[in-house]
Amino acid sequence: MQNNINQFNEVAATIFAYLHDHFPKPVGMKMHELVGGEINSDEMSMCPKTDFAKDVVNWLTDEGYIKSSGGNFALYSQCVLTSKGLDALNSTPDSLGGKATTISKIKDGLATGSSEVIKAAIGATVKSIVSHAL
């Protein structure tokens, strides 16, 4: 289970950073490209890494942190952070009364390859998600 949580943290951080970079524009996401996985359209299959990333996108969408359409072969369109997603990242735009902190930590962790920084930032996000759910 812990391995899944660590993998979730890394994929979620990549998704959040990608969508934050493009906010508020809805964008497409090819999960195999974002996570360094593979798809084989001839055999209609994907590698486990891409399949897991697809599950992360679906979970984030189902829980309301992002909006997305599609999903066949882990290809999504019209992806964007929701206000709930921005809030979880402490990244609501200043014009809406927010401030950026968590997303900066996630981007720093991705840029430096520091899994500890990513883990701490995603941990703060998960705490925020849980507190909103309760």
Image (cartoon, helix red, strand yellow):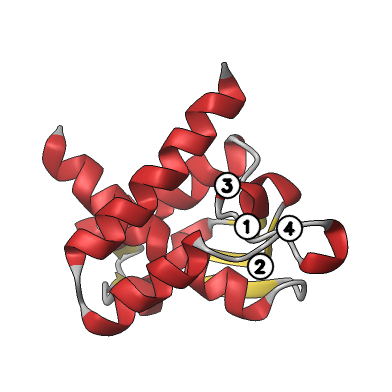
Amino acid on which disc 2 is placed: Ser
Q: Is residue 104 above or below residue 16?
A: below
Q: Quadrant of residue 53?
A: bottom left
Residue that label 3 marks: 88
Which quarter of the rendering shows the C terminus?
top right
Q: Nearer the viewer, residue 91 or 71?
A: 91
Crowd around label 2: few <14 · some 14–19 · many ≥20 (10 Å): some
Q: Nearer the viewer, residue 93 or 110?
A: 93
Crowd around label 1: few <14 · some 14–19 · many ≥20 (10 Å): some
The residue most toward the bottom is: 111
Amino acid on which disc 4 is placed: Gly
Q: Which mark is in front, 1 or 3?
A: 3
Residue that label 4 marks: 98
**Gap between marks 3 and 2 measured at Cα:** 22 Å
Q: Which mark is in front, 1 or 4?
A: 4
Q: Is residue 65 above or below residue 41?
A: above
Residue 107 position within the rendered picture, expressed as x and y whole percent measured from the top left = 41, 75
**Gap between marks 1 and 4 measured at Cα:** 30 Å
SS class, disc 1: strand
**Gap between marks 1 and 3 measured at Cα:** 24 Å
- Of callouts 3 and 2, the N-terminal one: 2
Give left or right: position of 52 versus 64. left
- Of callouts 4 and 3, the N-terminal one: 3
Residue 121 position within the rendered picture, expressed as x and y whole percent measured from the top left = 37, 55
| Circles 1, 2 touching at the beta carbon (< 8 Å) | yes
Q: Which mark is residue 105?
A: none
**Gap between marks 2 and 4 measured at Cα:** 27 Å
